[in-house]
Image (tube, coloured by chain):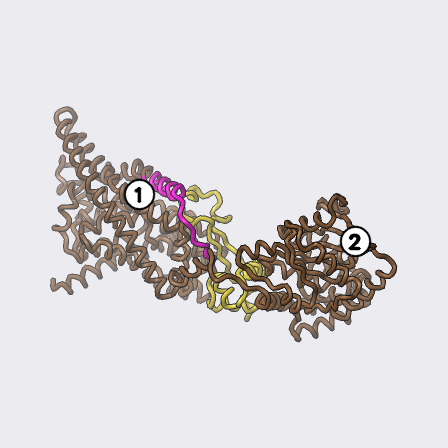
């Protein structure tokens, strides 16, 4: 390649004797100030049209300097020369076929690494290159120190620092162009080197194709592009080569299909060396702050502890602010129910008064008293999301995902499950393989959704008072622990150890926006109110009716009691009365129904429940609540997405066994430990 | 360097572009460029929050995706065999 470049240099120098016009092509990525340089060089002396046969704008222009005439062509902005886009094809075809005397590569001095891949490709083409470090002022403002002399020594080509918008560096650029053109500059580019193994293949390819390569292409460049798998060059050479030669070339290319990784990898390594040699970046700044925070928040130990701490703070805030407000609303509701009941006695039939006071206000109304808790809960989660912390929480839990060997695309659906399990299951559609998708769907209901966490937020303080924060925190950890264990087991059984490794993006931290958080809270509260006004209201009425009839108002002789007594044997091993078992049962319709049902059956359950069940039974009940079969909307989503009753029933059965098993275990072990 | 990047992902030694940049001792923007090239070559798949799988989902508004979304790059079979 170097031999060829030298020949080209000699050719351009001999042209210089004949004419004093230098043909210069300007190249670079979009937004590096290439047009500003072009305008600064050509002024009014420019022509704008289209590239022949293309809709891409072509700008040409010129300027004179003494006896020297410069003709400039502003090539389209490109990121590389791989012929992936029409702009890239135009740029490389112009250099290959029109052979400018000099190519000027414009680079943004604030982010030079982005443009150096293009430079690495330009250095392989048959035209000498001058590098322009534009926007040196911007780089200086950002504290980035670029050393043009060091870069020039490392690259072996002229490097010109410029601030085109301030008119600085134009003379130096023209000097460098002339020096390269007339051979005064010792042009000796240090190109990326490919691996020795591929060098042998490259030489073999050159030997095969050299005599058939169309005259406008350099043979060694064509051979390299073939090895890179460049579609356009492959097509050109397939047409140019005799069939038997093409067969050899084709077989060789198939054997070295991944050579692009070594060739492009060598270019990136070369860029890395150039940047390390010539660019010094500031240690502080927005990225520095994020990096410093992430040093703690994404650390395996400290990050996990921070995540657990954040979860604890979320629940503490929810309880500290939300619970007193919820109690106040509850008291108001209770007084309202009494006033309603007293006022309507004798006016309406007794059953209708009971329905309004106990069924509607005691059930659906009770659920509405959660509202302050939910507003605070959603506001805190919205705050964490808007600062960028939730991505870190995802990153920390991602360790478990890797341990489980779950597909990278499983992660996002499972993350969504913390809001609601339904979008988590629908979100699994992005996973291509059926086994990984179904496994994600199986695990998604184990993510504690906001509805389940809201129920825990109401019940935990009733049973455990000041220790409620720790209990809630432990319940979430238990859910995630069960999810991890099941994931590992199913990964071995269903995915048979198939690994799928991935990386994820961590956005910069930023100040939260009040409006964004407000929208997040509003959308979630609205969804909750819609559920309270429909599903929860309907279930409250049904539960009330089943608890009121057939013997008016006597819950112990009601239909519900009859159903509940069927659950008594199971309730006994968990230390739970049938009313709590029925409350669990109604949570199948919607998780919040647990509270509505307790409100209908017990009335003032906050005062009554702690006296009715022991702490181990209460803890067992909360664990069952968290791990219990998902709500009917989630089950419908599982059926819809898997289109399999077997998988849906497996999911339901699995969660039923796990939840009840865990509840029994906790109650029995707790009772034993407490000497019961 | 591209094979080294794929191997880092395969071995779980780097789990974010920032970690890749630190291990490979190159700027983050260069890692992003490499990731783009590996996606174009079929060695990685990139998944973005609410991409095609979530289109038409009535709950998309309330699903709690972090602002700006999240991107994941997953190693493909081609990527895994290339760095084997």
Residue at mark 1 to residue at mark 2: CA–CA distance: 71 Å
Q: Residue at x 61, y 64 (%)?
A: A147
- Label 1 sits on a secondary structure element that is helix
Q: In which quarter of the image is the N terminus of chain A?
A: bottom right
Quadrant of res B33? bottom right
Quadrant of res A135? bottom right
x and y, in percent, of residue A215 in the image: 82, 61
In the visual, does A225 lie left or right of A600? right
- Label 2 sits on a secondary structure element that is strand
Q: Residue at x 13, y 41 (%)?
A: A557
* Vertical order, A512 against A294 (above or below): above
Q: In the rendered structure, the residue with mark 2 lies on which chain?
A: A
Where does the magenta region start and end? A504-528
Q: In the rendered structure, the residue with mark 1 lies on which chain?
A: A
Q: The yellow chain is which one?
A: B
How crowded pointer 2 is (Cα within 10 Å; few <14, some 14-19, many 20+) is rated as few
Query: What residue is disc 1 on?
Result: A375
In the visual, does A486 lie left or right of A366? right
Say if residue A400 shows up in the picture. Answer: yes
x and y, in percent, of residue A546 in the image: 20, 39
Q: Residue at x 75, y 51 (%)?
A: A73
Residue A65 disc label: 2
Q: In which quarter of the image is the C terminus of chain A?
A: bottom left
Tell me, yes or no, whether dots 1 and 2 are on the same chain: yes
Q: The brown chain is which one?
A: A
x and y, in percent, of residue A200 in the image: 70, 75
Residue A243 disc label: none
Say if residue A589 shows up in the picture. Answer: no
Q: Is A664 colored magenta in this rendering?
A: no
Q: Cβ–Cβ below 8 Å for labels 1 and 2?
A: no
Which secondary structure dominates the residues rendered in magenta? helix
């Amino acid at each position: 390649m170097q031999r060829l470049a030298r020949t080209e240099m000699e050719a351009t120098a001999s042209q210089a004797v004949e004419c004093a016009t230098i043909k210069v092509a300007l190249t670079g990525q979009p937004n590096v100030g290439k047009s500003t340089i072009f305008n600064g060089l050509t002024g009014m002396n420019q022509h704008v049209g289209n590239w022949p046969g293309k809709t891409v704008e072509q700008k040409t222009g010129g300027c004179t300097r003494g006896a020297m005439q410069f003709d400039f062509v502003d090539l389209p902005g490109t990121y590389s020369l791989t012929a992936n886009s029409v702009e890239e094809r135009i740029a490389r075809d112009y250099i290959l076929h029109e052979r400018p005397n000099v190519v000027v590569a414009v680079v943004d001095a604030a982010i030079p690494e982005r443009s150096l891949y293009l430079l690495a490709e330009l250095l392989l083409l048959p035209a000498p290159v001058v590098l322009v470090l534009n926007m040196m002022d911007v780089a200086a403002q950002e504290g980035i120190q670029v050393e043009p002399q060091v870069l020039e020594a490392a690259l072996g080509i002229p490097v010109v620092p410029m601030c085109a918008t301030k008119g600085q560096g134009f003379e130096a650029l023209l000097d460098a162009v002339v020096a390269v053109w007339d051979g005064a500059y010792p042009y000796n580019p240090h190109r990326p080197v490919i691996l020795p193994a591929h060098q042998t293949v490259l030489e073999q390819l050159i030997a095969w194709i050299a005599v058939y390569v169309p005259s406008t292409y350099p043979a060694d460049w064509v051979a390299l592009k073939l090895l890179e798998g460049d579609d356009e060059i492959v097509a050109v050479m397939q047409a140019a080569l005799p069939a038997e030669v093409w067969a050899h070339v084709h077989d060789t290319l198939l054997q070295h299909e991944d050579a692009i990784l070594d060739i492009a990898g060598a270019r990136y390594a070369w860029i890395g060396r150039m940047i390390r040699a010539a660019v010094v970046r500031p240690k502080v700044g927005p990225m520095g702050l994020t990096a410093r925070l992430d040093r703690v928040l994404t650390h395996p130990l400290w990050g996990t502890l921070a995540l657990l701490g954040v979860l604890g703070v979320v629940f503490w805030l929810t309880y500290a602010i939300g619970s007193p407000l919820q109690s106040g609303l509850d008291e108001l509701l209770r007084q309202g129910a009494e006033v309603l009941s007293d006022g309507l006695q004798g006016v309406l039939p007794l059953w209708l008064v009971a329905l309004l006071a106990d069924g509607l206000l005691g059930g659906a109304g009770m659920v509405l008293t959660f509202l302050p808790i939910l507003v605070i809960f959603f506001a805190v989660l919205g705050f964490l999301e808007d600062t960028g912390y939730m991505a870190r929480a995802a990153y920390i839990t991602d360790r478990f995902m890797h341990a489980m060997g779950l597909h990278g695309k499983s992660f996002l659906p499972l993350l969504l499950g913390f809001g609601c399990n339904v979008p988590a299951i629908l979100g699994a559609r992005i996973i291509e393989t059926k086994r990984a998708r179904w496994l994600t769907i199986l695990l998604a209901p184990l993510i504690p959704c906001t509805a389940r966490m809201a129920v825990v937020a109401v019940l935990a303080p009733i049973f455990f008072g000041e220790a409620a924060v720790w209990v809630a925190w432990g319940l979430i950890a238990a859910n995630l622990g069960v999810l991890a264990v099941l994931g590992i087991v199913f990964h071995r059984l269903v995915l048979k150890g198939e690994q799928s490794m991935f990386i994820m993006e961590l956005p910069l931290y930023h100040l939260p926006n009040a409006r964004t958080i407000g929208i997040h809270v509003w959308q979630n509260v609205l969804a909750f109110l819609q559920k309270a006004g429909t599903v929860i209201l309907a279930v409250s009425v049904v539960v009330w009716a089943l608890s009121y009839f057939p013997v008016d108002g006597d819950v112990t002789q009601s239909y519900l009691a009859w159903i509940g007594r069927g659950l008594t044997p199971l309730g006994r091993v968990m230390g739970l009365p049938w009313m709590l078992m029925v409350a669990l049962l109604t949570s199948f319709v919607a998780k919040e129904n647990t509270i509505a049902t307790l409100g209908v059956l017990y009335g003032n359950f906050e005062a009554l429940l702690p006296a009715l069940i022991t702490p181990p039974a209460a803890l067992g009940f909360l664990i069952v609540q968290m791990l219990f079969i998902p709500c009917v909307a989630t089950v419908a989503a599982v059926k819809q997405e898997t289109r399999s009753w077997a998988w849906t029933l497996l999911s339901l059965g699995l969660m039923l066994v796990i939840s009840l098993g865990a509840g029994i275990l906790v109650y029995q072990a707790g009772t034993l430990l407490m000497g019961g | 360097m591209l094979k080294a990047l794929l191997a880092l992902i395969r071995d779980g030694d780097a789990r974010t572009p920032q970690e890749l940049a630190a291990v490979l001792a190159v700027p983050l923007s260069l890692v992003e460029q490499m990731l783009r090239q590996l996606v174009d070559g079929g060695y990685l798949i990139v998944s973005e929050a609410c991409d095609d799988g979530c289109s038409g989902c009535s709950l998309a508004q309330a699903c709690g995706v972090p602002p700006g979304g999240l991107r994941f790059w997953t190693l493909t079979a081609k990527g895994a065999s290339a760095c084997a």
